[in-house]
Amino acid sequence: MTAFIDIVLSGLFHAAVLFLLAGGLQLVFGVQKIVNLACGAFYALGAYFGITLVTNAMKYGMPGYSLIIVLIVAGLLIGLVGPFIERLLRLVYAREEGFQLLLTFAIMLLLEDLMRMIWGATPMTLGNLSMTYGQINFASTSIPTYKILVIGASIILALGLGWMLQKTDFGRIVRATAENRRMSEAMGVNVVWINVVIFTMGTMLGTIGGALVVPTAAASLEMISEVMVEAFAVVVIGGLGSMRGALVGALIVGIMRAFAVSIYAEIDLLLIYLIVIGILIFKPAGLFGKAVES
């Protein structure tokens, strides 16, 4: 029973972080119709900057309980690279998807080299700083409180994002722009500004996800490709452009990988690939995506 709870908790924690990254992907695609291959670089950028900000904050007497707050702030701050990246993407909004993919891939490589220049190629960690919050005893097992807090923070962010998109005037404008860009422009909507805000929000979701994971995992350049594969697996499973799909896909990938690692670690990604292949064969639009009519 103890092992089962540990596996499920690890899966939910991974799913919570993965949802933030995949949610950013879905948000950007839903409005701007761009598949962002640089998402893994944003995640890694959040991880590295999170370590840097926490390390410096500790020098000035940061109390341990504020760790998660500092990490979220780090994700928000470094996510402000979003407007600058979006400015580059304007060059390919009207181009074919191939050009968009190539540009976002080039941005990923650029950010990877910048991170290597700034932080080096050696993985960085925060040690066991996550244990600052202690543990919760439940069903004869000890559950790290930090993981519970991250899961809760992810849920709050998801609910806040959903409320904003569904219940606010800004959200209605965003949804109208996603449905019909030209009609929105004709009605006086500043679509350029909408694109900047949405891309920045998508970037921040990714950088926050990366920042929140570093108390439990090392920040490294290798995480860029690994998390990008997982994020796109989530998108394929859930359906491109669906936030609900991102949530369900993240849960499937996170929990499946946690169980795979506990049984035979070498097959963790293989299982995810098999699920993705099955979805592409039997339900190409994903679980919640809209099928494209020919």
Image (tube, rainbow, N blue to C red):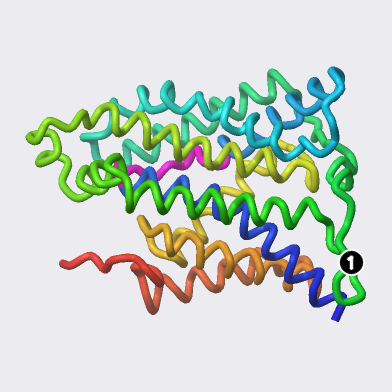
The N terminus is located in which quarter? bottom right
What residue is disc 1 on? 137
In the foreground, 82 or 224: 82
Left-right relation of 196 to 131: left
Reply above or below: 157 against 185.
below
Q: Position of residue 43 (x, y in %)?
A: 60, 39
Q: Position of residue 28 (x, y in %)?
A: 38, 43
Reply above or below: 44 against 110.
below
Left-right relation of 237 to 259: left
Q: Position of residue 286 (x, y in %)?
A: 39, 69
Give the extent of the magenta segment.
31-40
Which residue occupies 69% across, 58% down? 13
Q: Secondary structure at mark 1?
A: strand
Is 11 covered by the magenta stretch? no
**Residue 121's image quarter?**
top right
**Residue 209's image quarter?**
top right
Q: Residues within 10 Å of mark 1 (few under 14, many from 20)?
A: few
In the foreground, 18 or 1: 1
The C terminus is located in which quarter? bottom left
Which residue occupies 13% across, 34% down? 185
Left-right relation of 123 to 78: right
Which residue occupies 21% across, 34% down? 94
Most common secondary structure along the magenta stretch: loop
Is 32 covered by the magenta stretch? yes
